[in-house]
């Protein structure tokens, strides 16, 4: 045991100079090889990396960061990593950053401004190279001032924060719910409910506005009793649909803020003996994987989640490399995906 412990202690003390001397190369060459630089021939790089492993050399990235000004670390903060939407977006971001040899650190804020603030402060303290931020609900310019003051390269993801000139990439949220609701209007529905969302984030405001625009274009009134805010999860969607279906003016169709809400709505309808697609039309938004399964087959709006994630990561890398670039905004267009939860002919479409 003593000999093993002594070996570990010696391995921790191996320096860049030790590796260089063992191979008869310069410290700079060893450093470049460790960072997989194309300036070092592949054969030489492989030989150096093999010796690094043999000697047990541990690259001191903190020290390297002090000399280069780069830590090759970036933060990623989302408000709900359990949401399949953000799982897919985050996976795409991590893939791009990894290919660029960037380490990503994830924070699931769970809509906590305090947790978000602590994460931002930690990134600043550890001199992270940048941040991709899906802001928690209620985030203001003041809350982002620490990263703005320190010029930390930052890309806002999906949710915008009014008053900032930070880079942004997201979906056309207004068009998303306009497409969803417009589809229901086109099927002949006159009494349409909207479940989910609210007014706390840019995305929720825009989706609600898209719902209203489609209703206005169809010349249809909005019954305030049929517009219900709720959390973005199936349990909340199920509770909300119970409330909506108890209204005197019972809807024949329901537009949902997200697919997760729609899954709860569908579950709630089944529990009431109401068959989605036959008795009440349901449309979601996001096109998460579960919506295409045979037991759901939900009409929804496809958001290009992986493209949004890849674009956000690419945007951050550009911002890190060229901090003086003008702010960039990229908004991607969604697409309506029609499935069996919104058939026209078997659904009752007359006014109640």
Image (spheres, helix red, strand yellow):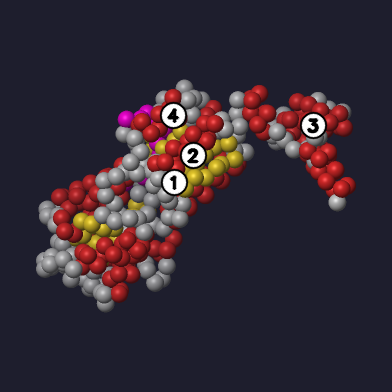
Residue 271 on the magenta segment: no
Q: Residues within 10 Å of mark 4 (few under 14, many from 20)?
A: some
Image coords of residue 315 (percent x, y): 48, 35
Asked if marks 1 and 2 touch (Cβ < 8 Å), the reply is yes
Q: Which residue is mark 2?
A: 119
Q: Residues within 10 Å of mark 2 (few under 14, many from 20)?
A: many
Residue 95 visible at all: yes
Question: In the shown orientation, is residue 72 left or right of residue 143?
Answer: right
Q: Which residue is mark 4?
A: 146
Residue at the image point whose x is 37% and y is 68% from the top: 296
Picture disc at residue 15: 3
Query: Which stretch did the figure color magenta?
Result: 163-175
Residue 170 on the magenta segment: yes
Question: In the shown orientation, is residue 174 left or right of residue 320?
Answer: left
Asked if marks 4 and 2 touch (Cβ < 8 Å), the reply is no
User: Which comes sooner in the sequence, label 3 or label 4?
Assistant: 3
User: Which comes sooner in the sequence, label 3 or label 1?
Assistant: 3
User: Which comes sooner in the sequence, label 4 or label 1?
Assistant: 1
Residue at the image point whose x is 23% and y is 51% from the top: 211
Q: Separation of disc 1 and disc 2 at Cα?
A: 9 Å
């Amino acid at each position: 045991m003593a000999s093993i412990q002594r070996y570990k202690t010696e391995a921790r003390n191996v320096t860049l100079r030790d590796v260089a001397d063992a191979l008869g190369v310069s410290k700079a060459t060893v450093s470049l090889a460790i960072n997989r630089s194309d300036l070092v021939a592949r054969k030489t790089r492989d030989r150096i990396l093999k010796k690094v492993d043999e000697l047990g050399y541990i690259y001191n990235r903190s020290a390297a960061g002090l000399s280069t000004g780069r830590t090759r670390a970036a933060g990623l903060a989302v408000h709900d990593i359990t949401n399949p939407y953000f799982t897919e977006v985050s996976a795409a971001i991590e893939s791009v950053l990894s290919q660029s040899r960037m380490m990503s650190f994830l924070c699931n804020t769970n809509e906590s401004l305090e947790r978000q603030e602590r994460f931002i402060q930690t990134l600043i303290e550890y001199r992270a190279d940048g941040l991709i931020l899906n802001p928690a609900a209620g985030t203001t310019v003041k809350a982002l001032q620490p990263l703005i003051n320190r010029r930390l390269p930052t890309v806002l993801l999906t949710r915008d924060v009014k008053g900032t000139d930070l880079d942004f990439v997201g979906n056309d949220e207004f068009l998303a719910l306009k497409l969803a609701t417009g589809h229901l209007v086109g099927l002949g529905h006159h009494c349409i409910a909207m479940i989910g969302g609210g007014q706390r984030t840019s995305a929720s405001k825009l989706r609600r506005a898209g719902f209203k625009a489609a209703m206005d274009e169809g010349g249809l009134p909005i019954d305030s009793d049929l517009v219900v805010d709720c959390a973005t999860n199936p349990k909340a969607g199920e509770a909300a649909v119970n409330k909506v279906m108890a209204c005197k003016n019972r809807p024949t169709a329901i537009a949902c803020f997200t697919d997760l809400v729609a899954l709860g709505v569908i579950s709630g309808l089944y529990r009431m003996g109401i068959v989605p697609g036959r008795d009440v039309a349901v449309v979601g938004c996001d096109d998460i994987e579960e919506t295409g399964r045979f037991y759901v087959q939900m009409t929804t709006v496809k958001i290009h989640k992986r493209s949004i994630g890849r674009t956000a990561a690419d945007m951050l890398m550009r911002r890190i490399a060229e901090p003086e670039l003008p702010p960039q905004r990229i908004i991607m267009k969604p697409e309506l995906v029609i499935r069996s939860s919104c058939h026209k002919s078997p659904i009752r479409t007359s006014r109640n």
